[in-house]
Amino acid sequence: MDHAQQHTGQHLLSAVFLSELGAKTVSFHLGADSATIDLALREGAERLSEVELRRVETAANRLIYEDRAVRPGWFSREEAEAMLARGELYKLPERSGRMRVVEMAGVEFNACGGTHVRSTGAIGGLLVRRVEKVKQGWRVEFCCGLRAVRAAGQDFATLGQAAGVLSVGAVDVPARVAALIEEGKAAAKERKALVEELAQAEAVALVGAEAERAVVTAVFAGKDVEFAKRVVAKVAGLGRAAVVGVTSGADGAVAAARRPGSALDAGKALREVLSAAGARGGGSAEIAQGVCRGEQVEALVAQLSQALGG
């Protein structure tokens, strides 16, 4: 019964997409939890809008409520070809002899050998879940009958959980999520500016503390590779070569920058040193970076310093 509901629902949904939007179904997939159809949109159409999806969904459910009869019948090849010529059938299978054609009263005729319910009312309701762009067109996910009931219940439970976490009513979840996203963007922008300031301060301090060394070196705990890259870039901006290592738990990373005007290739030096240690990295001749184990950082910093003339 579940299979018949989804299959008949697909027939109905495809017919409504064709009649309402001129969108043709090019493939159908029935999974354990949901089903999909792939659509080729009418010429000139670029996408399926939410308004169009809900219009199709409403039209399909109206036909379900009307409880239209679903009747299979057997026709000769000649009879089926005549139906095709009259526009009653969309396509025919490539076979000879008698064929099974399923009529959905007032909706469509479809050459199909699959299982169907006896009337559209037995589909029990149709829920369009989502749509996405795929290689062959637009994929629409839907479910019918008890699957639709279960899916709606799960969606509502998920919405309720989100509302509880956010301490708002269910209807306020979208607005609250949008506000949190904007707050997150603002916080990320502020954090980036602070990291830039910190990297500049650390670079100035390192250059001042290691005035006699050809290559400035340092290792920072609790930082990431992006911070290491920023520090070596700032040091290079002050006219010095630099190698900086960072550790975060068991993970590590190193970054290197050559002195401005130097003929040394920082990317090549870093790749050679890290490769010999079983680590990986890359970059340009000016600045390069790589990841390694945290326990390797100090040794790699020393080796890179020597490679850059330290």
Image (cartoon, rainbow, N blue to C red):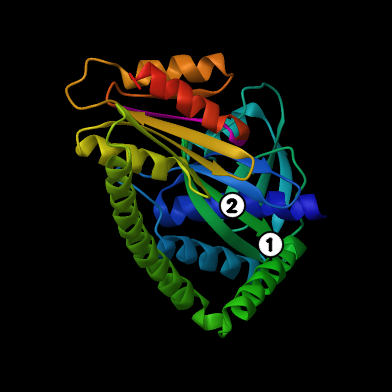
Q: Residue at x 64, y 40 (%)?
A: 250
**Residue 104: in sight, yes or no?**
no
Quickly name the residue at label 2.
141
Amino acid at pointer 2: Glu
Q: In the picture provided, is 137 more to the left or to the right than 265?
A: right
How far across and how far down the image is residue 220, in percent?
48, 45
Question: Where 275 falls versus 300 (above or below)?
Answer: above
| Residue at x 28%, y 41% (from the top left corner) | 207
Q: Nearer the viewer, residue 197 or 41?
A: 197
In this rendering, position of residue 251 left or right of residue 207: right
Q: Residue 188, located in which quarter of the rendered image? A: bottom left
Mark identifier at residue 120: 1
Q: Is most of the magenta stretch helix, strand or loop?
A: strand
Task: Give the x, y percent position of residue 144.
Answer: 69, 60
- 126 in the magenta segment: no
Q: Position of residue 68 (x, y in %)?
A: 66, 63
Q: Nearer the viewer, residue 159 or 28?
A: 159
